[in-house]
Image (cartoon, rainbow, N blue to C red):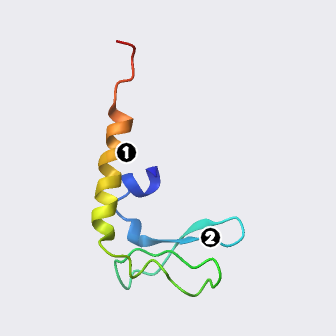
């Protein structure tokens, strides 16, 4: 959550879910979200994500709320 919520350059990376999973650099030919299919490492299932920027903006907002929240008693 913190990686995608607090990094504005999420489009520079691709997420791989095969084996142990990892986040890797990718080429910058487009600025879409990249998430590689667990069945086929060459198939990017994230590039057609609908309104992904809005999703990350909500995630960023909630993450900042959680991190900035004062949970002291009273």
Callout 2 secondary element: loop
Judging by the rendered image, the residue that carries numbered circle 2 is 17
Callout 1 secondary element: helix
- Tag 1 and tag 2, C-beta contact below 8 Å: no
Q: Position of residue 32 (x, y in %)?
A: 36, 77
* Dot 2 alpha-carbon crowd within 10 angstroms: few under 14, some 14 to 19, many 20 or more: some
Can you name the residue that lies furthest to the right here? 19
Image quarter of the C terminus = top left
> In the rendered view, does 36 fall on the left or right side of 73?
right
Front-most of residues 21 and 54? 54
Front-most of residues 41 and 51? 51
Figure check: 66 above or below 16: above
Kindly identify the residue that appears in the image at 55 percent across and 78 percent down. Answer: 36
Q: Earlier in the sequence, mark 1 or mark 2?
A: 2
Q: Position of residue 55 (x, y in %)?
A: 33, 62
Judging by the rendered image, the residue that carries numbered circle 1 is 63
Q: Position of residue 18 (x, y in %)?
A: 67, 73
Q: How many marks?
A: 2
Task: State the image quarter where residue 39 is shown.
Answer: bottom right
> In the rendered view, does 68 fall on the left or right side of 25?
left
Figure check: 55 above or below 36: above
Task: State the image quarter where residue 58 is shown.
Answer: bottom left
Kindly identify the residue that appears in the image at 39 percent across and 17 percent down. Answer: 72
> In the rendered view, does 17 fall on the left or right side of 29?
right
Report how far apart the C-alphas of labels 1 and 2 lie in the structure: 23 Å
Figure check: 11 above or below 39: above
**Which disc, if any, is residue 33?**
none
Kindly identify the residue that appears in the image at 37 percent across and 37 percent down. Answer: 66
* Dot 1 alpha-carbon crowd within 10 angstroms: few under 14, some 14 to 19, many 20 or more: some
Task: State the image quarter where residue 4 is shown.
Answer: bottom left
């Amino acid at each position: 959550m913190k990686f995608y919520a607090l990094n504005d350059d999420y489009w520079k990376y691709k997420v791989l879910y095969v084996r142990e999973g990892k986040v890797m650099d990718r080429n910058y030919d487009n600025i879409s979200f990249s998430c590689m299919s667990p069945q086929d490492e060459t198939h990017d299932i994230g590039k057609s994500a609908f309104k992904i920027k809005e999703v990350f903006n909500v995630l960023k907002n909630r993450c900042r709320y959680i991190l900035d929240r004062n949970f002291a008693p009273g």
